[in-house]
Image: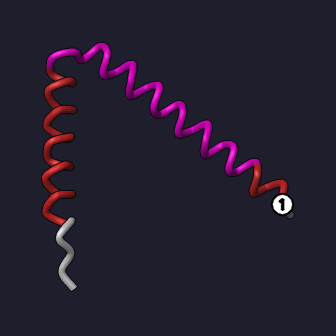
């Protein structure tokens, strides 16, 4: 079962990684702020899921 989407996914991942690398090199301060905000958002989601799971039982 060969998927025709797999090469396209690899290409898009490669392009997005390249764009992220260019962004980090050209604007490291903005990249650090965006990374910190993204990490804080993920931690808030994890905390909310942990609170939800803890209150189920």
Magenta range: 26-51
Residue at image position (53%, 31%) is 40
Compared to 2, does 20 lie above or below?
A: above
Q: Name the chief secondary structure element in magenta.
A: helix
How far from the left and from the top, in percent, is residue 44?
61, 36
How far from the left and from the top, in percent, is residue 18?
13, 37
| Residue closest to the far bottom | 1
Residue 53 as seen in the image, left or right of residue 55:
left
Q: What element does badge 1 sit on?
A: helix
Closer to the camera in the image, 4 or 50: 4
Residue at image position (17%, 70%) is 4
What is the count of numbered marks? 1
- Neighbor class of circle 1 (other Cα within 10 Å; few <14, some 14-19, many 20+) is few
Residue 32 as seen in the image, left or right of residue 3:
right
How far from the left and from the top, in percent, is residue 49?
68, 50
Compared to 45, does 3 lie above or below?
A: below
How far from the left and from the top, in percent, is residue 50?
70, 51
Residue at image position (21%, 57%) is 9
Closer to the camera in the image, 25 or 8: 8
Residue corresponding to mark 1: 56
Residue 53: quarter of image:
bottom right
Residue 23 as seen in the image, left or right of residue 39:
left
């Amino acid at each position: 079962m060969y998927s025709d989407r797999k090469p396209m996914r690899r290409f898009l991942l490669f392009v997005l990684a390249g764009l992220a690398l260019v962004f980090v090199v050209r604007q490291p301060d903005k990249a650090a702020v965006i990374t910190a905000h993204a990490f804080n958002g993920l931690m808030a989601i994890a905390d909310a899921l942990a609170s939800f799971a803890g209150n189920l039982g």
